[in-house]
Image (cartoon, rainbow, N blue to C red):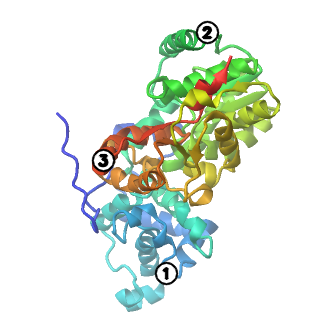
């Protein structure tokens, strides 16, 4: 029986929070990263407080996030979680204030003057639950950091708080389940090697029917390059997968896919750095095992951020390079290696919207625009583009079903940007964006009386490719 979703209340979103992972599931994750959680006899409040103070003293970014904020309100004007909900606790400054109050409560001035200096007098289970609620409503989109006059990145604080909550057994069931699937099977969807091969066979047949070419895809075989698509492309985004495969065929690259690393997402970024690294090593191990010289990352924003900044440096230790597939597409266009027909994508007015972590932490903004110029006849660059982009609303764990009422609200900003400029089709080349849009676009189209459509970018490359 389906659970009733919580009601969205403007000004107070305290009733919306992710379901918590159970102890058995958390134990599996803890053991993989060799973390020994505090025992049942441990005072969770005291543990959280101690760990928070440790991070405050040792982590420069956390200290900056807590101490540098002067409450100017610049972040409030651009934060999607605050703009769409009106709940001050669901904002960068509001979340930071919840933590700042704990730290102040441990200082001499806080113990003496209490509320007069906004120090927390009573840190109890109710307050801990409030931390869980509001820190899991954050999108980790980092837009606040772009506009903060001091460059304070509250996403750093969010990740730190979530990590400590995870240590005491408080974590999103959806995120933990996804991480568990990735660490067990090499992909978020828990696809088996047999299922992966069956889906590839089906897609190869479709490509032959639609494009008239027969392509071959190596699976778990040595090759020059390792292709890293999203496992969601094997279910929801088949057109994106077709684009990856046909493009690699068109440029004649010797490539393989690995059933041990068939993913682009890295949900460790949303939960705990130990799992970000654990998942990152899955890619490194697969690349080394197959003897490749190049790892080609496909469509995912936050995953690209983790891949570019952690996995690529690790790959280079073994003489392996890592690139985004967009880099290869741009090179192929400039080098005349592929022929594209924009007419194939019709007379639709497209809008390209930057995934958060391509624009803020991924250095991947101009390549997709170059590609758009060659695969469609007409497209719009949004008012809020590049570093100003609006989050899809599904990042940071917001894809959990129980978070849908909030996710719909978060999504209104990019949606309104699209319809205000007359776009008929939104292009968001990110696995999470496309998953989020599949959840919210039907609701938003009904709310606004529109028929906005969406896809990734490699979908358009697929249709435009002349082979």
Q: Nearer the viewer, residue 271 or 213?
A: 213
| Relative vertical location of residue 47 with respect to residue 192 in this rendering, above or below | below
Q: Which part of the image, by quadrant, shows the C terminus?
A: top right
Whole-angstrom CA distance, mark 2 to mark 1, is 60 Å
Name the residue carrying label 1: 71
Q: Position of residue 407 (x, y in %)?
A: 36, 51
Q: Name the N-terminal-most of marks 3 and 1.
A: 1
Q: Which part of the image, by quadrant, shows the N terminus?
A: top left
Asked which secondary structure carries label 1, the reply is loop
Quarter holding residue 446: top left
Q: Position of residue 376 (x, y in %)?
A: 61, 36
Name the residue carrying label 2: 212
Q: Nearer the viewer, residue 36 or 365?
A: 365
Whole-angstrom CA distance, mark 3 to mark 1, is 38 Å
Q: Position of residue 265 (x, y in %)?
A: 54, 38
Asked which secondary structure carries label 2, the reply is loop
Q: Name the N-terminal-most of marks 2 and 1.
A: 1
Residue 307 placement, left or right of 291: left
Asked which secondary structure carries label 3, the reply is loop
Q: Name the N-terminal-most of marks 2 and 3.
A: 2
Residue drawn at x 31%, y 67% is 127
Q: Nearer the viewer, mark 3 or mark 1?
A: 3
Residue drawn at x 64%, y 34% is 375
| Relative vertical location of residue 89 with respect to residue 342 in this rendering, above or below | below
Residue 340, numbered label: none
For the residue carrying disc 1, how many other residues have a C-alpha within 10 Å: few (<14), some (14-19), or many (20+)?
A: few
Name the residue carrying label 3: 449
């Amino acid at each position: 029986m389906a659970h009733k979703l919580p009601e969205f209340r403007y000004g107070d979103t305290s009733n919306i929070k992710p379901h918590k992972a159970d102890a058995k599931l958390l134990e599996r994750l803890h053991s993989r990263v060799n973390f020994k959680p505090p025992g049942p006899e441990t005072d969770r409040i005291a543990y959280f407080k101690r760990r928070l103070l440790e991070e405050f003293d040792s982590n420069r970014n956390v200290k900056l996030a807590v101490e540098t904020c002067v409450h100017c309100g610049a972040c409030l004007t651009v934060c999607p979680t605050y703009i769409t909900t009106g709940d001050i606790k669901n904002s960068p400054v509001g979340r930071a204030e919840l933590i700042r109050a704990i730290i102040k409560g441990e200082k001499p001035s806080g113990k003496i003057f209490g509320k007069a200096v906004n120090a927390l007098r009573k840190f109890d289970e109710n307050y801990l639950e409030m931390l869980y609620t509001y820190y899991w409503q954050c999108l980790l989109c980092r837009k606040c950091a772009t506009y903060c006059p001091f460059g304070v990145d509250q996403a750093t604080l969010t990740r730190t708080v979530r990590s400590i909550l995870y240590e005491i057994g408080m974590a999103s069931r959806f995120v933990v389940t996804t991480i568990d699937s990735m660490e067990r099977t090499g992909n978020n969807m828990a696809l088996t090697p047999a299922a992966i091969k069956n889906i590839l066979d089906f897609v190869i047949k479709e490509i032959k029917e639609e494009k008239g070419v027969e392509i071959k895809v190596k699976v778990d075989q040595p090759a020059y390059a390792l292709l890293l698509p999203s496992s969601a492309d094997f279910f929801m985004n088949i057109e994106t997968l077709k684009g990856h495969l046909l493009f690699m065929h068109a440029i004649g690259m010797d490539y393989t896919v690995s059933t041990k690393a068939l993913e682009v997402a890295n949900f460790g970024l949303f939960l705990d750095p130990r799992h970000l690294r654990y998942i990152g090593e899955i890619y490194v191990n697969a690349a080394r095992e197959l003897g490749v010289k190049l790892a080609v990352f496909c469509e995912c924003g936050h995953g690209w951020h983790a891949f570019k900044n952690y996995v690529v440096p690790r790959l280079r230790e073994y003489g392996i390079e890592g690139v985004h597939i967009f880099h290869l597409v741009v090179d192929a266009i400039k080098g005349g290696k592929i022929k594209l027909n924009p007419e194939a994508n019709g007379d639709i007015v497209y809008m390209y919207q930057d995934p958060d972590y391509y624009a803020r932490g991924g250095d991947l903004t101009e390549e997709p625009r170059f590609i758009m110029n060659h695969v469609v006849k007409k497209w719009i660059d949004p008012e809020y583009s590049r570093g100003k982009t609006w989050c899809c609303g599904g990042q940071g764990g917001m894809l959990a079903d129980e978070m849908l009422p909030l996710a719909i609200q978060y999504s209104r900003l990019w949606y309104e940007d699209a319809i205000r400029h007359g776009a008929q089709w939104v292009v968001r080349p990110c696995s999470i964006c496309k998953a989020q849009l599949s959840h919210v676009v039907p609701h938003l189209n009904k709310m606004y009386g529109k028929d906005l459509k969406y896809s990734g970018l490699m979908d358009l490359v697929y249709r435009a490719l002349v082979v």
